[in-house]
Image (spheres, rainbow, N blue to C red):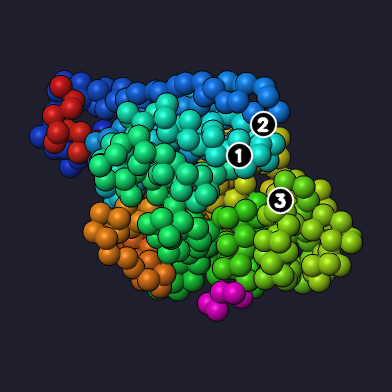
Amino acid sequence: MQEQTRSIVQLSLDALMQDSTFISDLEGETRQKAFTSLAAILSTPNKIHKSFLRIPLEDGQVVRIPAFRVHHNDALGPYKGGIRFHESVNEEEVVNLAFLMTLKNALHGVPFGGGKGGIVLNPRARTTKELNLISKKYVQYFADVIGPDKDIPAPDVGSGEREMDWMMAEYKSIKPGLPYRGSFTGKSVLNGGSLGRREATGKGVYFTYRYMMHDYVNKHREDLVSINNPFAQTALQASNRSLKIAVQGFGNVGSVTALEAFQCPMLPNKVVAVSDRNITLFNENGLDIPSLVEFSAKNKGELPSSRHALTESGVRAELLDRDEVLTLDVDVLMLAALEDQVHSGNMEKIKASILVEGANAPVTAEADEFLNKKGTIIIPDILANAGGVIVSYFEWLQGRETQFYSEDQIFVKLFNKMQHTMDTILPQYFGDPHSLRQNCYIHSVMKLSTILYKQGKLY
């Protein structure tokens, strides 16, 4: 992952180096030294905080659980990023995710830097009491490096508003008399959270796909027809026809994304497959997504994984292996599970011509390059799944101002911000040979580089 980070930075800087209008007052040897400094600054984190949380379990055991908080870069504002509760968490992964948060915030004009946290555990294997203690211990161990103007954590894989409520309460106890509502985002509404925060990432994922395939393509159809660009051709071929959609992952992100696709009045979508950690459900005529959302909510977030459970849900579907969702004959594949799902071992079997990254880094670098060469449109995580951090920013603002927006106002503000980003990026994407991911990276690195230069950080 560290090699991938360095590669992202270097490729973006190489493109910017050729642009004489970018920081034009830097020339010759001075310019080269500044770009060398930028490569070093952007490819490494400012700080890595690591600890072992000492947790007495309910069965009498005492365990020590590795935990991380990474501060990548704060040129644009306080560090911002989720806390992942998962057994696969490791330092390299958290560092890479913090780096991607820096780029994501820069891309969308959110005044935060990039941070990330992680705790190595399987939350399903812990009791509520143990998870409460783990959450509080995390705040106790990292209390000096987090705060509403330093580093503002949020939920991530395995954590949610419950954990953020616990953590905010612990921060309030440790830091009495200090502002605390902005110390964590993704909280429950009763504890100062924002309406719409839970659905924000999934709605944003679907919005990026819908905006590209409906609003943007229809508005710029004549321009797209006239240019020789493989991604423009893919978009035109897919537009204005019924598309079959598969959604990998049916948690907070995937379930909301699938429901948005099912209910969308602008595109004649047909959601034919969804999956979770146990099963893939498939129906070529389309799945009853509202019934699946209702079943999942009543069954600890899981899809029906047996004939009996399907009968109970009232949904008609075939039961397939969980990984089959990736290689089905569909038009659109929305990836809302974990990282590294599309890789060298299955990339040649991917039939979808449009991939949307609801999860962080679900497509490996090798698979990304292979699919882009085929003209596959990949809407990357940095663009598609930013809904959570954007609404977290709105939550942070509301906590400071003690004025709160309605859910409709939140979604209008979210979509306006994401639309602005796409209107900035898509003309370049459909006009040059770079992938959409690389275009996003170049834009983010350009913004960060300009800020670092103006702040005098390159000398």
What residue is rendered at 16% in x and 37% in y? 23
Q: Do callouts 1 and 3 mark residues in contact (Cβ within 8 Å)?
A: no
Coordinates of residue 156 in the picture (x, y in percent)? 51, 44
In the rendered image, residue 264 lying in the magenta stretch gets the answer yes
The residue lying toward the viewer, choosing from 257 and 8, is 257
Disc 2 to disc 1, how far (Cα)? 8 Å
Q: In the rendered structure, which amino acid carries the disc numbered 1? A: Lys
Q: Nearer the viewer, mark 1 or mark 3?
A: 1
Q: Which residues are magenta?
A: 263-268
Coordinates of residue 452 in the picture (x, y in percent)? 20, 33
Q: Kindly state the secondary structure of the residue where label 3 is placed.
A: loop
Q: Is residue 107 visible?
A: yes
The residue lying toward the viewer, choosing from 186 and 276, is 186
Residue that badge 1 annotates: 129
Q: Is residue 182 left or right of residue 198?
A: left
Q: Kindly state the secondary structure of the residue where label 1 is placed.
A: helix
Q: Is residue 107 left or right of residue 252?
A: left
Residue that badge 2 annotates: 58
Q: Nearer the viewer, mark 3 or mark 2?
A: 2
Q: In the rendered structure, which amino acid carries the disc numbered 2? A: Glu
* Above-or-below relation of 110 to 120: below
Q: Is residue 62 left or right of residue 98?
A: right
What residue is rendered at 77% in x and 72% in y? 285
Q: Is residue 314 left or right of residue 300?
A: right
Residue that badge 3 annotates: 276
User: Which callout, 1 or 3, points at the residue further toward the start of the chain?
Assistant: 1
What residue is rendered at 38% in x and 53% in y? 392
